[in-house]
Amino acid sequence: MDSSFTSTQKAELPAWLRQDMRSNHAGETGAVYIYRGILSVSRDEQVRTFAREHLTTEENHLELISNELPVCHHSIFLPLWKLAGFLTGAIPSLFGSNAVYATIDAVETFVGEHYLEQIDRLQAEASFPELRALLEKCRNDEIDHRDEARDAKSTGSRPFLTGWCWLVKKGSKSAVILARWR
Ligand SMILES: [Fe+2]
Ligand SMILES: [Fe+2]
């Protein structure tokens, strides 16, 4: 997909879109670290294959988003997003495959909604069609990730896992707010 902008066009991103792209870059960085966190802890072969495949996709997303956002506009909290992502993958891995799949279901559900809001706004404003196509591509992959996790996890979560997934979603929401700001 040819979705690259010239440097002049990049500078012309409206403030709201630049903020969204900063949150997307922060989110994809976090996503890469989630799967790295899983791979550093889990010894379950099914989980490891799942995480390895998703990691490849997330690295690709990060590269695509990075191409659209100059380094000077990256979030100043990137080290925090890396740590938070790593822990979001590593912690459930200590509790087994179902905890991992439930966590990924929660994260990817959130990310899918986050991208959809931006896609809808770009569609309504009929602006930056290449960028919208890029976000749609990323979103489709996140939905696939969500569905894979949802299919793999067992139905009926224990209260602890439900609480953890609630925390993950709240954390993701706060991270977006912070990353949009700086
Ligand atoms: Fe992604
Ligand atoms: Fe994903």
Image (cartoon, rainbow, N blue to C red):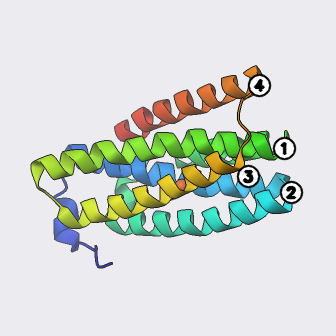
At 40% across and 33% down in the image, what residue appears? 177
| Callout in the foreground (3, 1) | 1
Cβ at disc 2 under 8 Å from ligand 2: no
Q: Is residue 123 left or right of residue 167?
A: left
Q: Is residue 69 visible?
A: no
| C-alpha span from label 2 to label 4 | 21 Å
* Other residues around mark 4 within 10 Å, as few (<14) / some (14–19) / many (≥20): few
* Other residues around mark 2 within 10 Å, as few (<14) / some (14–19) / many (≥20): some
Q: Which residue is mark 4?
A: 158
Image coordinates for residue 53, horizontal then vertical, percent:
65, 67
At 18% across and 63% down in the image, what residue appears? 129
Numbered circles on residues, count: 4
Mark 3 lies on a secondary structure that is helix
For this orientation, the residue located farthest to the left is 126
| C-alpha span from label 3 to label 4 | 22 Å
The N terminus sits in image quarter: bottom left
- Which circle marks residue 1 in the picture? none
The reply to whether dot 3 and dot 1 touch (C-beta < 8 Å) is no
What's the amino acid at mark 2? Asp
| C-alpha span from label 3 to label 2 | 13 Å
The numbered mark, 3 or 2, whose residue comes first in the sequence reads: 3
Task: Relative to 71, say whether 104 is above or below.
Answer: above
Mark 1 lies on a secondary structure that is loop
The C terminus sits in image quarter: top left
| C-alpha span from label 1 to label 2 | 8 Å
The reply to whether dot 1 and dot 2 touch (C-beta < 8 Å) is yes
Q: Which residue is mark 3?
A: 37
At 84% across and 53% down in the image, what residue appears? 42
At 81% across and 56% down in the image, what residue appears? 40
| C-alpha span from label 3 to label 1 | 13 Å
- Which circle marks residue 44 in the picture? 2
The numbered mark, 3 or 4, whose residue comes first in the sequence reads: 3
